[in-house]
Amino acid sequence: MEDIVKPANDAEAIKMLHQFNEDLLPKKFGKIGVTWVLFLCVIIINGLFFYVKQLRNGLSVTGMGDIVSWGIYISNFVFFVAISLVGSLITAVLYLLNVNWRSPLTRIAEIIAVAAIVFAGLIIIVDMGRPDRILNMFIYGRIQSPIVWDVIVVMTYMTISLLLLYFPLLPGIAFCRDRLPGIPKWQKWMYKFLSFGWQWKPEQFKIVKRAIAILSVLIIPVAFSIHTVTSWLFATTYRPGWDSSIFGPYFVAGAFMVGAGGVIAAMYVLVRFFPRYDKYITDKHFDRMGILLALLSMVYLYFNINEYMVPGYKMKGEDAQYLTELFVGKFAMMFWSVQVFGMIIPIILLLFKKFRRPFPIFIISICVIVGAWFKRFLIVIPTLLHPFLPIQEVPEKFKVYIPTLAEWSITLASLAGALLIITVFIRYFPIISIWEVAEERGIGHDVIYKHLNEKE
């Protein structure tokens, strides 16, 4: 990493804190920001329109049927669960490993994780058709069911992720409360309420740091559990392509990869549209994240080889038909595009430093994210189209799955909803942690306290 400039005395430290305030406290959006929010709102409203239609007419508005009973809703659920792992990767794992360059990236990872896991839960309710059926999970749920395990770990992971976002954010909220000029009364009240009387006392920092350490330890096994249990929903179902003992680590490896890609994409957008952020998210951060993404992609490539080579070598029974459609059949173009453009080419390019610069790595990360979504499509749909016991005397349309306009609209609305949560957060809260950046530069809490009690 580039050498971090540290203040020589308290006067320089306070001057530096003023610069942090100027650079990192949230500001009103310009025309581009407002247009982006309106764009997301239009997509969400369109999705809500089709969801109301689905509520009125049932799942008949979708392309799902008796054979393909899970469609792109479940593909989207698995994608959201995967990208949510980034919170534990950047915040917890790198925190516990004491990786010093993570500080400007932690909150980016945390809000992506929270937004993703919130919509992972919502898309499951959408997939149920009737939202009131979610109550049956709590009234009649059986602990023997992997679906109940999934509900438990999703709720637990969501709770820990929210806490891991909120506790480090407390000093940032206090910065907004004390140093943001000319904001509306409701915004002042919001910061005052959410800051819980934060006063920059040393004992408060001790509590926050202890909470971060405890949550960082807790979230790792819970994060592994949510991806493992999600994989068990498939692996414990007797279908070709899902009968795999490595589905747990296979899902975890893929989740780490797409999560890292999501953070890189967010980093680039922040640096591109918030000019002063490039002082804190530098080319070195992109370079380190590129190396991390290459490593995670290699691990995922290893599991992909295991997942397809062993059954492909044997080509037995229904697995042979399923794999044939993936390798050379109607899903072949999507399958090989995902493998090549979403994983193999990114690995090769990221080995070269020039492709770990901001714009090239942004394009690579988008390829990884798009490839990851279609990878989840390939995990769900082709398998369902090849049941071990084919259903007899069903309409021909049941043997083909084509997502309808309603499904695409609702799925896009869920993706837009997650992006809107991240966008609103950036508008009202510091997306780069001011106190952690200050701490990284050797500025003590007593100096921050002195700075905040200065007269404007």
Image (cartoon, rainbow, N blue to C red):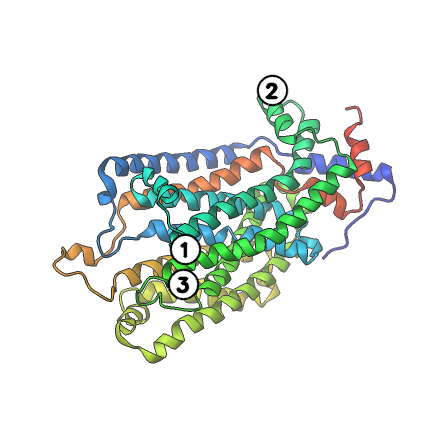
Tell me which residue sits at (43%, 51%) in the image.
Answer: 150
Q: Nearer the viewer, mark 3 or mark 2?
A: 2
Q: Which residue is mark 2?
A: 185
Tell me which residue sits at (60%, 20%) in the image.
Answer: 185
Query: SS at mark 2?
Result: helix
Q: Which residue is mark 3?
A: 338
Q: Which residue is mark 1?
A: 373
* Residue 43 shown left or right of residue 200 in the figure: left
The answer to whether residue 366 is seen in the rendering is: no
**Disc 2 crowd, CA 10 A, few/some/many (<14, 14-19, 20+):** few
Indicate the position of residue 371 as horizontal and vertical percent values: 42, 59
Marks 3 & 2, CB-CB < 8 Å contact? no
Earlier residue among tags 1 and 2? 2
Would you place residue 87 above or below residue 177 in this image?
below
Earlier residue among tags 1 and 3? 3
**Disc 1 crowd, CA 10 A, few/some/many (<14, 14-19, 20+):** many
Residue type, label 2? Lys
Indicate the position of residue 381 as horizontal and vertical percent values: 31, 59
The quarter in which the N terminus is drawn is: bottom right
